[in-house]
Image (cartoon, rainbow, N blue to C red):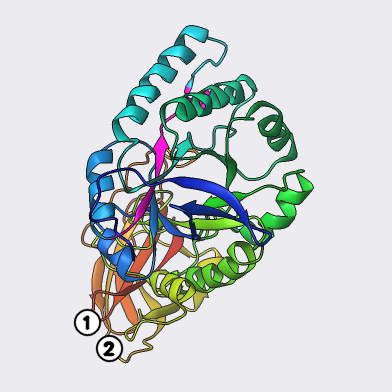
Amino acid sequence: MDKNSNTSSPVRVAVECIDGQHRLTVNGEPFFVKGAGGGFGHTETLAHRGGNSIRTWSTKNAARVLDEAHAVGLKVLMGLDVARERHGFDYDDRQAVKKQLDTLAEQVREFKDHPALLAWGIGNELNLGATNPAVWDAVNEIATMIHELDGNHPATTMLAGANKTVVDEFTARCTEVDFLSIQMYGDVGNAKEKLSAAGYTGPYLITEWGATGHWEVPLTPWNAPIEQTSSEKADKILERYTAAVLGDPANCMGSYVFLWGQKQERTPTWYGLFTEAGEQTEAIDVMQYVWTGSWPKKRAPRLTEIAIGGKTRHDGVKLTTGASARAEVTTSSPTSSPISIRAEILSEATVVGEGGDYEPRPDAIPDTIKNTDCDSIEFTAPVKPGAYRLFAYVSDDSGRVATANLPFLVE
C-alpha cells in the first residue's frame, strides 16, 4: 500500500469516470474506498484487515488522526462539523452562517496539504430534523470555499437516507459539491434503487452503514428496541456489503462501515465493531473478507441466541424483583479457541440522542451476576422494578468476542 512516505505534499484526488464506473482517483490511480467510520486508536488494525480509509465527523484531533492514518497507509475523509438545525442553529441568520463559514475555512487551510487527506465531508445528516432548505445553500457556500482554498480534494455532504425531497434540494442548491454521500442501515441493500427513485444518478459514497438501526428493529412490549447478536450483525453486514457497495459498480465509489471503535448509542454494543475493552467482533472478520477476499486464520466466536428460561429477546421476558434466574447462551467457535463468558446487567437507556448525539452509558447494576460458565449465566433480578438488559460477552483466547443482550422487565 502506498503510504506516500517520502513526501509531505498533498495528493491529488478527483472524481472520474473510468470504463463507465465512477471512482475516486488518488494521483491518477483509482481508489475504491474500503473504509470505516472512526478508527482512532485502531488504525493499524484497519490497515492490517485490508481497509484503506477512515472517516471523521469533525477536525477534532485532526493532526493526530491524519498522522496516524498516514503512518499505516490510510486516507482520511475529513469531516467538517456543520451546525444542525435540530440543535437550534438558524440558517436564516446570515451572520451566524458567515461566522461558521470563516471557522471552517480556517480548518481547511490548516489541513488541506496533509498527504493522508482524501476528501472533505461537509456536515453530517444535516437533513435530519431540518425544515429550512437554506442549510443546503450554506453547504454549497462551504463547498465553494473548499474549492477556492484547496484545489486537490473534492467535497461531499452526508445525507440520512435518500429522500427525494432532500435529494432534489441537494441537486438544485449544492452545485459545487462534487458527489453525494448517503447513510443507511437496515435498508442499505436498497441504496441503488432508493437513489434512483430519488432522481440521483451520479457518484456517491455510503459513509455510514452496518448493524440494523435501533429505529428499525422490533420492540418489546415496553418499547425497548431488540438488538441483534454480534453474529446476526456480521451475517447482515456481509449481505449488505454485497448488495449495496458491490451492487452498484457504476456509481458507488466505496463505503465506510460504522463504527470502527465503540460508542454508547442505545446500548454499548449496538454499533461498535469493537467492545469497550477493545475486543474485536465477528463483523471485523467479515470486513477483512469483503476487503481482501480472505478470512482471517483465527475468527471471532459466534453467538446466535440468548434466552432466559427458554424465552428469547423476542418473547418479552419479565422477572420478579430479586428473583434468581438463568440465561442460556448459544455459542460456537470457528477456530476452537477456549471460550469464556462475562456478563453484566444495565438499566435500559433513558437519556437517548438522535442522529448519533451523545448518550451516557446506562448504570450497571452491581452484585447481580452470580456465576457464568461456557453456555450459561446465573443472575439475580434487580430489586428495583424497571427495564433492564442482560449483556453477554463471549470471548476467546485471541482478543475476539461475540456479544448479545436480552431486554427484560422487572416487576
Q: Is residue 291 among what the camera can see? A: yes
Q: Does the magenta stretch include residue 85?
A: yes
Find the residue positioned furthest to the bottom: 336
Residue 365 appears in the picture as rendered: no
Find residue 397 and report its horizontal and vertical position in percent.
Answer: 22, 82
Q: Quadrant of the C terminus?
A: bottom left
Residue 410 versus residue 369: which sits nearer the camera?
Answer: 369
Q: In which quadrant is the N terminus drawn? A: bottom left
The magenta region covers 73-87
Q: In this view, does 240 lie above or below 149?
A: below
The numbered mark, 1 or 2, whose residue comes first in the sequence reads 2
Left or right of 130: which side holds 38?
Answer: left
Name the residue: 66% across, 32% down: 170
User: Residue, x 29% and y 36% (percent of image)?
Assistant: 60
Vertical order, 262 against 329 (above or below):
above
At label 2, which amino acid type do we have? Ser
Q: Is residue 145 above or below residue 295?
A: above
Q: What element carries label 2?
A: loop
Disc assigned to residue 313: none
Pointers 1 and 2 in contact (C-beta within 8 Å): yes
- Locate residue 77 relative to residue 172 in the image: left or right: left
- CA separation in Å, label 1 and label 2: 6 Å
Instruction: Kindly identify which numbered label has been placed on residue 337.
Output: 2
Circle 1 residue: 397
